[in-house]
Amino acid sequence: MKHDKANCKDLSPQLEQLGIYLDEFLKFNHGDAMMHQKRWKEILHKPLPVDGIGIDKVISMLGEHIVLNGSPIPKPTFTSFITTGATNVGVLANLAVSVAAPQRIGHHAFSFLEELSLKWISEMFGLSDNMEGVYSSGGSTANILALGAARQWAYEKIDIDPAQDGIGQSSRIYASSASHHTIHRAAAVLGLGRNAVTIIDSDMQGRLLPKALEQQIKSDIQNNYLPVAIIANAGTTGTGSIDPLERIAEIAKKYSVWFHVDGAYGLPGILDERVKPQYEGLHSADSVIVDPHKWLGAPVGIGATYVRDRKLLHRAFKQGDSDYLEGACTDENIQHSLDDLGIPYHDYGLELSAPSRGAVVWALITEIGKAGFVDRVCRHNQIARDMAERVKHEDCLQLLIEPTLSICCFRYFDDNISDINELNRNIHRELIRQNQHLPSTTVINGQLAIRPCFIGARTEENHAFELIDEVIRIGKQLCILKNAV
Ligand SMILES: *Cc1c(COP(=O)(O)O)cnc(C)c1O
């Protein structure tokens, strides 16, 4: 009997070992990966192994040389971009998925949770009852799926099946300049072209101006362009601003254009009663996306797209018949998990092989309930507001935009410095090099902002206040140096 060389027996001995290493990582006492890069690169930079070293030594190497030299993203004081480390239950559920349900196809408990968790998300965030969902790898693909449905819908209205025959007519997608650039990529991938994305003016808060939108649509229709979709942001990536959804919905309806809401980051913001009124109009959306791997704390690799009717996604993204699936299923009398592939998520998007992401989302929601997410979202929004208040009281700081959600954009200011953007770039670089507080930056109306975004479950108020202290300390220091020259 010849066995496979890979260990396929009990998991728990190695799990326990790996768990010890991961717990050490989660104490966040280690330095940045680049600090020790010479050492770990030396150890890891090996030629292709011909003979393996066995699972125990692999786990040791992971623990001793790789884990502690991982990414700073899970740190409580990491507030860059819109990304965070997974909470523990998400990590554990992800592990269970990779062992017990490698694919979402078929009828089993994991695939049951796919649909259930999609419904829960939809209900939790107040989408309209008839929305149907599908998971994909994240916001980028979620936007492609939503716009794929929009493209299908818009072209079918003029008797073209774009998925089958391609597109002939020039089309338009409307978005504000604050929209995520995965919209442009989606337009490129879907054959509409990046130039189809038409940027609509926004106000000083980065919110799309409905009047400008309406004018543009009117003139485009006159010029024979086909409006494919209007993109509204429920939480822009830069500042967390929410577009005037209700006004945009009215315009979409009036001109019969698909209304897409990108809530990859900000859809969970609806859980905060103080912001909820700004989501008025969400009900009219034809498609909505949200990223469970952002505010919900899922491991990276989970986005969700919602549309009113998944048949549209099916027409846009189905694979078509193939010999290798012929005869694999039966239509009636389903008695075994493999009698049928189940809900054809694989025909609603771009992925055939895909993990059972629903079980992860189910675990996240089941652990802390809707109330737990209300707490988290309100806490993070409050941190951004408290931070904004503090910034306003400091002479050397300027608030660049009132926070809507959990992003606070501010900058250091000194009358004697001519290039304030450069000063803040330098402050930011110094922050990163010190490796304690890790916000990112953005530009608001030409002004460079230090931009912490609070979404991590491990992030708390004192982290925000310490960041302010650090910015003031570094800013003062740099100004003294500068003035001394
Ligand atoms: C993060 C984000 C995206 C992209 O999502 P990924 O999961 O990173 O692919 C799209 N839109 C908005 C508004 C986002 O914040």
Image (cartoon, helix red, strand yellow):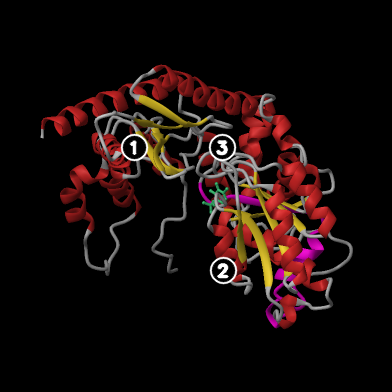
Find out if the beta carbon at label 3 lies less than 8 Å from the nearest ligand 1 atom. no
Question: Looking at this rendering, what residue extends furthest in the top direction?
Answer: 393
Secondary element under disc 1, as helix, strand or loop, is helix
Position of the N terminus, as image quadrant, is: bottom left
- Examine the rendering and report whether any part of residue 134 can be seen: no
Amino acid carrying label 2: it is: Arg
Residue 364 lies in the magenta stretch: no
Q: Position of residue 377 (x, y in %)?
A: 59, 29
Residue 295: which numbered mark, if any?
A: 3
Amino acid carrying label 3: it is: Trp
Of tags 2 and 1, which is closer to the observer?
2
Question: Looking at this rendering, what residue extends furthest in the right direction?
Answer: 332
Judge from the rendering whether residue 204 lies leftward or rightward of residue 71; answer left or right.
Answer: right
Amino acid carrying label 1: it is: Tyr
**Disc on the earlier residue, 1 or 3:** 1
Q: As displayed, is residue 98 above or below residue 88?
A: below
Secondary element under disc 3, as helix, strand or loop, is loop
Of tags 2 and 3, which is closer to the observer?
2
Residue 448: which numbered mark, if any?
A: none
Q: What is the distance, in whole Å, between disc 1 and disc 3 at their CAs?
A: 26 Å
Q: As displayed, is residue 293 above or below residue 471?
A: below
